Image (cartoon, rainbow, N blue to C red):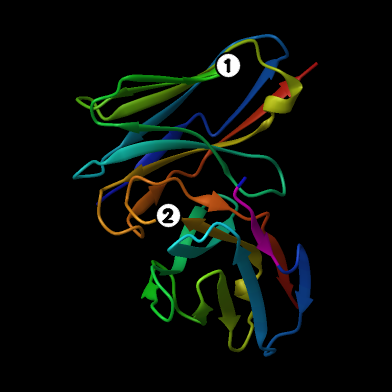
Amino acid sequence: KNQVEQSPQSLIILEGKNCTLQCNYTVSPFSNLRWYKQDTGRGPVSLTIMTFSENTKSNGRYTATLDADTKQSSLHITASQLSDSASYICVVSDGGSQGNLIFGKGTKLSVKP
Amino acid sequence: DVKVTQSSRYLVKRTGEKVFLECVQDMDHENMFWYRQDPGLGLRLIYFSYDVKMKEKGDIPEGYSVSREKKERFSLILESASTNQTSMYLCASSPGGAWKTQYFGPGTRLLVL
């Protein structure tokens, strides 16, 4: 069964610190992997999208990595800010119709001053 | 910027009422989606549409129907609202192709009493 598992479920860090969020998937075939940021009460916003051949992609202080062999991805946040407090959702596509997106349940990050 | 708007941010309805949730996108996207998001369950796809008057069931279509009469508008209908349909409803749109990022609306938080 296609699944996307994220860890940790929640995380609290101090402002200025780095953190890494994990995403493991069992989706097959694999097309691409996306990370979304969702602020409380808002819709998700895309951070990165990575294909099979990409192993790193950055978007400002956000860096996503992908290991297609082990089916793992991580999202690293550098020098965290209070505005990074949000849920981060990992989404994997199997390349089928647009409906074939498998969503993780998200990691809730809280950045404290 | 892509803009996806939803007709209401908050909605309170009574059991048995017919509920309409409207979504409009302004980027001429072919694909539109309706999700619900519940704590601990992540986003789950209800229906999607890849063209005007076309619709496909997602993972949890029971109790819902949709309408896409115009390309920019995708409506979600709860024929007879029930308390277990209390949730956050998110609309999204994307250009054609599995590669393309989905753009989400701000969400509608529906409470069914």
In the image, is residue B39 part of the stretch drawn in magenta? no
Image position, residue A29 (x, y; %): 19, 45
Q: Chain of mark 1?
A: A
Label 1 neighbour load within 10 Å: few <14, some 14-19, many 20+:
few
- Circle 1 SS class: loop
Q: Tell which residue pokes out farthest to the front in this image.
A: B28
**Is residue A77 left or right of A55 when viewed as pictured?**
right
Q: How many marks?
A: 2
Q: Residue at x 20, y 45 (%)?
A: A28
Q: Residue at x 67, y 61 (%)?
A: B5
Taking depth in this image into account, of B104 and A74 the one nearest to the observer is: B104
Classify residue B54 by image quadrant.
bottom left
> Which amino acid type is marked by label 2?
Pro
Q: Which residues are magenta?
A: B2-6
**Is residue A85 left or right of A26 when viewed as pictured?**
right
**On the image, numbered disc 2 is attached to which residue?**
B95
- Asked if residue A45 is positioned above or below residue A16 in the image, the reply reads below
Q: Chain of mark 2?
A: B
Taking depth in this image into account, of B100 and B14 the one nearest to the observer is: B100
> Can marks 1 and 2 be said to lie on one chain?
no
**Is residue B106 left or right of B12 when viewed as pictured?**
left
Magenta span: chief secondary structure: strand
- Asked if residue B101 is positioned above or below residue B5 in the image, the reply reads above
**On the image, numbered disc 1 is attached to which residue?**
A61
